[in-house]
Amino acid sequence: MVSLLMLISLAALCLIALTYVVYPLWQLTFPGRPMDFSGEFTPPSVSIVFAAYNEASIIEAKIRSIYHTRYPIHLVSVWIGSDLSTDGTDEIIRELQHEFPRLNLHVNETRSGKSATINTLVDRTVAEVIIATDANILFKEETIEELVRPISLQKATAVAGSLVYEDAGVSNSTTTSEKAYLSIENLIRRAESRKHGICFGMEGGLYSMKRSYWQPIPPNTYMEDFFQTVQLIARDQKVLFNESAIGLEDVSTSLKEEYRRKIRISIGNWQNLIRFYPLLFKHLYPFGVLFFLHKVLRWLTPHLYLVALISGLSSSHWVLFAGVLIGLPISQLILLAFGWATPLMYFYAMNAALFIGFLRYLKGVKSSVWQPTKRNQHES
């Protein structure tokens, strides 16, 4: 006879499978019809804003990629907020200002973090459309146009771009796992956008929105992109995914770096969940269902794993649960000790980071000051 504890354990595991297996299959098997963003439009003025901290190795390439565009350059202004960089980032920007007159640099008086820096920059802009990005995301010639086109055609209030990891000649299990994860996420966002007119959520490294709908990011917020996504959806505004708006990024080659980044992401996830959880019930479908299946359950995966583990070990079939739920992560740690970080190890590490982020959120977030993730372009 199946015990109640065993049923609880199995139910927790089924919820994990629901967010990581069933939901992606649902979206990817029925991806929806392509959205039509074609047509002539009158290009609006655009302000591109991003924060930078110690990005000397990539900042010039970033700036030049923005200005190497087919979008009318006289309509584009660039605003960079330096969070007291110490590696020469500011000097590189100032030198490029001679070449690009509409390139603006703001230097914070104290370390302020990305959200506060972006707020300061947006306050200084007057353009019709804001494009928010990251210092390490390189634009293609059509990136600005594709981020602006759906907005100008009145088909969306905000547009999520598509981040693509470049192959920098370094390949290991971490890079492979992160590339696969991002590729699947892009496909899911595309399907959500096509079928439901919702994109969960905009990538902080590449998104655009009408300036008039921008909301100041709350203090010490980590995931400002998701905050902007949900505040728009809460106001019944369309946030769509445009796979043609491409940003190029070097993937992290270090499991440790990805672990640290996922902790920051987890803190931001919980900040936004507490802010917006009433919307799960106010806009039950499609918002509430998609939010729960795509995001909330994923954020709760480490908690569900612990529920499955504790319930399983307390049941009469504890040997089976111990072998699977304890044996698997231990086997991955052993393989990692020998230098082999498998995709399963990536899954465990990222969910451990989610749980650590949750604990740090409970302790209180007093600062969103960050260190840039070390990626290929930062390594010698």
Image (cartoon, rainbow, N blue to C red):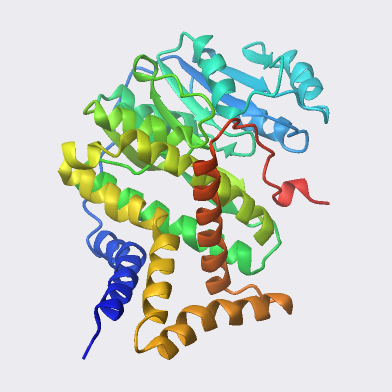
Which of the 4 quarters of the picture holds residue 211? top left
- Using the image as rendered, state which of residue 3 and residue 57 is in the foreground: 3
The picture places residue 248, in percent across and down from the top left corner, at 57, 45
Q: Is residue 288 above or below residue 258?
A: above
Q: Residue drawn 42% across and 84% down?
A: 321
Whether residue 121 appears in this view of the structure is: yes
In the rendered image, the vertical position of residue 89 relative to residue 299, given as above or below: above
Q: How many marks?
A: 0
Question: Residue 125: x percent and y percent?
Answer: 50, 11
Q: Is residue 195 left or right of residue 377?
A: left
Residue occupying image coordinates x 25% and y 65%: 29
Seen from the viewer's position, the closer of residues 112 and 166 is 112
Left or right: 105 in relation to 361: right
Q: In the rendered image, which quarter contains the N terminus?
A: bottom left
Question: Relative to 324, does residue 192 appear above or below in the rendering?
Answer: above
Q: Would residue 289 appear left or right of 127 to someone viewing this image?
A: left
Q: Residue at x 34, y 44 (%)?
A: 200
Q: Position of residue 131 (x, y in %)?
A: 48, 26
Q: Quadrant of residue 216?
A: top left
In percent of width and height, residue 118 lies at: 55, 22
